Amino acid sequence: MKPQKGWATVWKLLVAAVFVTLTFLLTISGRSSSIQTKPLLRLDGQWYFETDLISGTLAVGERPDKQGYSQKTQSWVVYSTNLPSQYDDPHSLIFRDLSHRTTVSIDGKEIYSFGHSPQYHEAIPVGAYHIMAIPPDSHGKKLTIRFESFGSVLPVAKVPEVIIGQGYTLLARTIVKNAPMILLGLLILIMGLLLSIFGLVTLSRPVSNEGIVFFGVFAMLVGTWSILSTDIPQLLWGNHQGMMIIKISCFMLCAVPFEMFIMHVFNPKRAWLYRVLSVITLCQYIVAVVTTVVIPGSLHAMLYATHAIIAVTCIAIIWTMINAVREKTMRDAPWFFGSFSVLVLGIAVDFFNYYRDPSPNNNRYFVLAMFIFSIITGWRTFGRLIESYMQGVNAELYEKIAFNDILTGLPNRTAFEKKLDELRLDVQKCSNAVIVMLDLDHLKQINDTFGHRAGDGSLRKIASLIQEVYGKVGGICYRIGGDEFVVLLDERGAKQVTALSSELHSKIEKLNTSSIIPLSVSLGYAVGSMADVSDPYLIFERADAMMYRCKQQGK
């Protein structure tokens, strides 16, 4: 014990020394600038605007309809301001827009275009981060940004927050700014993927997986939508309209798997309501896709129907959960109700912000609430699944003990009788079945002479040989008593029963050449007929009688 205490002291001293050394190195290390410290220029001044009806000046974040003009009558808006007179070339600029065709010019010369055909399908509205290089010697020149409506009911674009800086710095700062939302979406996506995989794996087990696959699919849809809503994947890899379709589809369809999850977990009395809601959601998605192609820009308008379906679904789920809590029909109902209330609050706040002032950030509270909801719900559901899984494992273990012989590993008499009952229900199999009855000779003498341990070993050897010979033709081998075995053969094995019996005797004789305990078996068999359909046990009795005659002859 003393040497161990000495080594423990040395180990603690070494750990302390490593910590002190690391602290010293960090203290004397130099510091360099990062992307967070590099200067950026924001065009925070007044912008001149012009629409098809009005003109004037606005600050960053404002839009013309705030001045009392109807947003639906303004199909385009142009914002302009002067670039700073001092900045170092080369520089770029970046800004974000919710969903408009965009054209950027400097002194009337176009430098960037987004959302126009033939590069983009004009029926599908799309927004993005717009990043572009500023031509050299553009200092002090007029910057013009033109936004055109896709034909949707969204308001005209706000005055964008335009930031000027080095291209790499702008990209890195934009990613860092959206990192929390990306991280939350990624965590929700990974959790949904893991839950789905685990749920699919357990489908083959005798376990109720509590609809965890549906919840996993729901989490994956929400996680994907959350990540794409940051517009960072689009900024890095392009294909803005393709990712826009995926993003909107995830949002419009996420209610379906969640409704199925609630049905499996709570078993509501009005389960038909959730089936109806899921059908309505799917139909509404199909209608939205068709309408978008026929009527350009109508996709955002179809979101109103999606919002209404989500609101009705939330009300139905809350009512179901309240009943579950009140009636105490589910142990975890209070946890589900509390976490879902947080989710509903996040949805309500984002819906309010969307209708008050649409912006790319109208999903942040929902994503945060969804993360909290997913953690609590996933934890409780996963716990219930593990508990159900262990119950299934225990049930399998008990069934194995009940239907299998512990010594030889073969199915036991209970399993054999259950199989006979099944044969009674299948006329063809019963009439073509063959039952082989086998008995290990002189087991009592083996036990008395060599001991019960040797007797058990002899039973295992014979069981292994029986399984080896008859198992290759599909025979099912059983140990039904102390020294008695039964093999059930189908039509294929019935044609070879005599040859198989001879093969078994040959293998036993070969085994005896290297064993001090001589082994032998007596066997008999019987073939089923139509007369045995009502009682397959008659086949067993005939096989047992034949085996007994063989045993008597052997004596």
Image: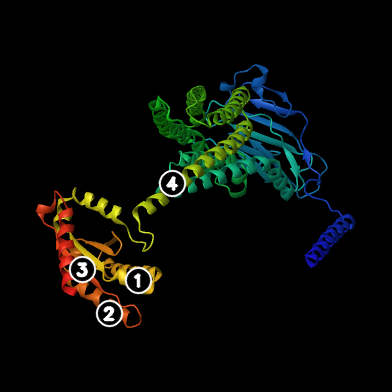
Horizontal and vertical percent position of residue 122: 50, 37
Amino acid, disc 3: Leu
Gap between marks 1 and 3 measured at Cα: 23 Å
Q: Quadrant of the N terminus?
A: bottom right
Q: Quadrant of the C terminus?
A: bottom left
Q: Earlier in the sequence, mark 4 or mark 2?
A: 4
Amino acid, disc 1: Asp
- Tell me if 13 is positioned left or right of 344 in this view: right
Q: Is residue 144 visible?
A: yes
Which type of secondary structure does the marked residue at label 3 adopt?
A: strand
Look at the picture and state if 407 lies above or below 324: below
Q: Which mark is residue 448?
A: 1
Quadrant location of residue 111?
Answer: top right
Packing grade of label 3 (10 A; few <14, some 14-19, many >=20) is many
Amino acid, disc 4: Gly
Horizontal and vertical percent position of residue 364: 63, 33
